[in-house]
């Protein structure tokens, strides 16, 4: 039996402090598993402004298992992972963060599950070391909300640490959407999926590249891309507000007939108007979010631009993309 090839996709953005250690742990794991599977390492440099790309090229020169994809600018984590998956040649593709929060040593266990016949093995966090209570609470809350809103069941407390079978990868490659929420997309694809419980470690070094603003944006993308409910909320709010307004009108007419309508109703009307205006803007904003996404899609721009690849395409062994 020939050994399967497992591609490992690692997005890197300003990971000067981490890149070498990440490579060391990954290659150590691959060396230990030599008898079971072969590995290819796809490092995606997401427009780092430090010397991450130089480090990656150096690693690629020293180790032929390494391929480097260099973006022409920063496109964000989800897009970087996407590019890696697009370029992967393995029979299964694993995705892992560079910062070693997801231990590379667990990949063999994922591979074992894949060999048992699972198409997707996704890491599910049972504990998070070294994360603030704020992140814990918001992350938990987010998954609860997301699952109430979306039509596709997206498993709780999962990140992008996962392993996917080639069949799933081929479907994924046919999903050209620009607003990408990978864990949702993979849930949507289906096939046989299973969780893999693990303990998420602390970041090895450096700082999180996901500040609160980016986290919120990802959460928002997840909801808008996987749920139509916000549009229904607008309808419900519209119904509610019209109902309340009608009742108020009735009250006002009665007050007017009995001669007791005074300033009270004037100010009441003012605040009601203000509220309606606010709700209108909110509704337009929500619709706008869907509209902007449609615009993003119809332009059909490529998802990313690659400035360079290492080793260069001509020298790279194996089939061409
Ligand atoms: N990352 C990336 N592009 C970005 C931000 C992050 O490729 O714009 C990578 C980063 O190098 C790391 C992974 O995405 O490998 C996860 O980022 P990070 O650890 O900073 O996020 P957190 O674990 O704090 O959510
Ligand atoms: Mg991290």
Image (cartoon, grey):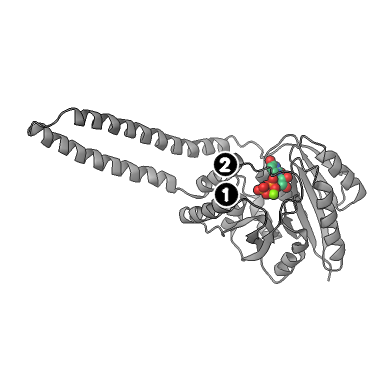
What is the number of callouts on the image?
2
Give the residue displayed 82% in from the left and 55% down from the top. 40
| Image position, residue 23 (x, y; %) | 83, 52
User: As rendered, which of 35 and 140 lies closer to the eye?
Assistant: 140
Query: Which mark sits nearer the N-terminus, 2 or 1?
Result: 1
Between marks 2 and 1, how big is the CA–CA gap? 17 Å
Q: Residue at x 57, y 49 (%)?
A: 134
Foreground residue among 106 and 190 = 106
| Secondary structure of residue under mark 2 | helix
- Position of residue 220 measured from the top left corner of the image (x, y, whole percent): 53, 44
The residue sitting at the left extreme is 258
- Report the residue marked by disc 2: 217
Q: Which mark is residue 102?
A: none
Would you name the residue on which mark 1 appears? Answer: 134
Q: Is residue 312 visible?
A: no
Nearest the eye: 101 or 166: 101
- Give the vertical position of 311 relative to 96 (above or below): above
Image quarter of residue 270: top left
């Amino acid at each position: 039996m020939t050994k399967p090839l497992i591609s490992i996709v690692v997005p890197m953005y300003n990971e000067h402090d981490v890149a070498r250690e990440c490579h060391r742990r990954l290659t150590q794991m691959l060396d230990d598993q030599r008898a079971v599977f072969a590995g290819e390492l796809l490092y995606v440099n997401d427009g780092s402004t430090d010397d991450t790309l130089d480090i990656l090229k150096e690693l690629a020169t020293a180790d032929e298992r390494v391929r480097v994809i260099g973006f022409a600018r920063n496109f964000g984590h989800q897009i970087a992972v996407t590019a890696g998956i697009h370029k992967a040649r393995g029979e299964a593709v694993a995705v892992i963060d560079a910062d070693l929060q997801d231990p590379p040593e667990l990949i063999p266990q994922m591979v074992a599950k894949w060999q048992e016949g699972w198409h997707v093995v996704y890491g599910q966090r049972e504990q998070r070391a070294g994360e603030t209570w704020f992140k814990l609470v918001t992350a938990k809350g987010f998954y609860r909300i997301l699952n109430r809103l979306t039509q596709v069941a997206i498993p709780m407390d999962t990140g992008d640490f996962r392993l996917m079978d080639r069949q799933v990868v081929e479907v994924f490659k046919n999903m050209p959407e620009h607003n990408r929420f990978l864990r949702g997309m993979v849930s949507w694809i289906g096939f046989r999926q299973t969780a893999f419980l693990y303990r998420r470690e602390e970041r090895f070094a450096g700082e999180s590249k996901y500040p609160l603003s980016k986290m919120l944006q990802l959460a928002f993308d997840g909801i808008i891309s996987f749920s139509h409910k916000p549009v229904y909320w607008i309808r419900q709010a519209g119904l509610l507000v019209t109902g309340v307004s009608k009742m108020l009108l009735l009250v006002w007419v009665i007050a007017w007939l009995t001669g007791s309508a005074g300033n009270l109703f004037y100010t009441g009307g003012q605040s009601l108007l203000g509220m309606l205006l606010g709700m209108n803007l909110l509704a337009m904003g929500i619709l706008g979010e869907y509209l902007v996404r449609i615009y993003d899609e119809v332009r059909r721009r490529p998802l990313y631009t690659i400035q360079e690849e290492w080793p260069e395409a001509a020298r790279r062994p194996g089939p061409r993309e």
